[in-house]
Amino acid sequence: MFMTRFTLPSRSALWGRRCSMMVLLASTWTAHADVLPRLPALGLAPDAVTVSGLSSGAYMAGQFGIAYSGSLSGSAVLAGGPYGCSRGSVSTAMFNCSCPAEKSAVLDLVNAFPGLGCYTFSPEVYRVFSERAIRGNQGAIDDPAHLQRHRVWLFSGGKDPVVHRQLVSAAELVYRSLGVPAEQIHREDVADAGHGFPSPQATQACSATRTPFLTQCHLDGAEQALKWLYPDMASAVAGQADAGRLRQFRQAPYGTRGEFNSLDSTGWVYVPKACEQAGAGCRLHVAFHGCEQGQSFKTNGERFGLQFVQGAGYNPWAEAGRIVVLYPQVKPSTQGDLYHPYRFNPKGCWDFWGYTEKYAAGNSAAPNFAKRSAPQMKAVKAMIDDLLRAPGTP
């Protein structure tokens, strides 16, 4: 008999007899001290999967949304540029698709010379680069025609020194050129916003560009993004987030053995109480953290922990909208360097320039990091597939 609620049998009963898949799943959700061996099958709606992210997470959300456009219904890009922006170059990623948040005398010196350092092209130039990358990856990504049914939410800040608002304009231009109807795109541009995720839980100024990159802009980014991506939530009121509904899971099963992906050992998933019930019709949203926001990133010796997972503000709206929120995690890696960028990810960013590839440079027309087969891309897709599976299926 299918269980409509998750209940926890005693450990002796659980391990002393054969149990159904649903009872095993029940035990994982209520044994809060445990780490799930992998994500559970929750039978979520396959036609209502959306993604969002900040900064490198925004680039990841954008490229994931295009590469897997046939499996998604929308994306929210907060302080991020267009698909394939870096063209497989770490220097392009650092200076033309973003700019280091930390200022230094060396960076100031480089920026003083025209053509060097941080420089933002016009949106039209980025559109050409992006469309070239999409054509080059034809067959390795879903047909962009699927984007015609997507909804897109964009956020930019007028005082953002890391991702210039022109890059967000370029992303908007690319979505339009790929056929996303204008009425399905919403752009939120806040003149005094720095580089951060706008959250009502944040305590630092809207104009701030510093850790934890959560800012008080009198705008609830998670609310606005989710309500745009799920129009039926328009009149919803935030629910009460329950820390007990936030579960940690192992990410190792989603990687390919011997393949570098920079994924942390664990990730997180928030499952609203209503979504524990059979046939709840819940949806799935994937939230990608930005650089320096992964749980294992350290600032002055202190781990970042769950500041993004709990502080970005998704979870109360997940309760209101019957939305499961997946928080995959990337960890820092310093095995390479700027001249040999393979495995060089010191700030724990999502891969939007090719650090998961041994030979990314020179592949600007068909960037591997933005294909369905890229290590991080296929790992997150596998996580999604687990959550979409019907309960009780192998």
Image: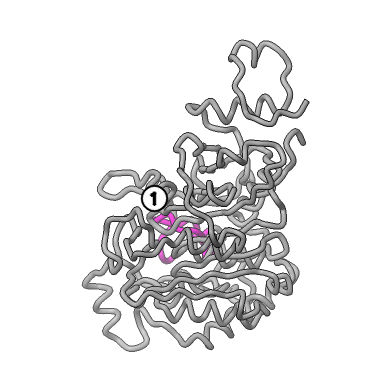
Q: How is the image coloured?
A: one colour
Answer whether residue 261 is magenta in the image.
no
Above or below, 120 relative to 373? below
On the image, the x and y values in percent for residue 120 come to 41, 82
The one of 170 and 228 positioned closer to us in this rendering: 228
Left or right of 113 on screen, residue 126: right
The one of 351 and 293 positioned closer to us in this rendering: 293
Q: Which residues are magenta?
A: 336-355
Element assignment for label 1: helix
Q: Which residue is mark 1?
A: 311
Observer able to see residue 141: yes
What amino acid type is highlighted by mark number 1? Gly
Observer able to see residue 340: no
Residue 107 image-quadrant placement: bottom left
On the image, the x and y values in percent for residue 147 come to 68, 71
Quarter of the picture containing the C terminus is top right
Left or right of 284 on screen, residue 223: left
On the image, the x and y values in percent for residue 328 come to 53, 49
- Residue placed at 42% from the left, 54% from the top? 312
On the image, the x and y values in percent for residue 3 come to 71, 28
Quarter of the picture containing the N terminus is top right
Q: Which SS does the magenta portion mostly show?
A: loop
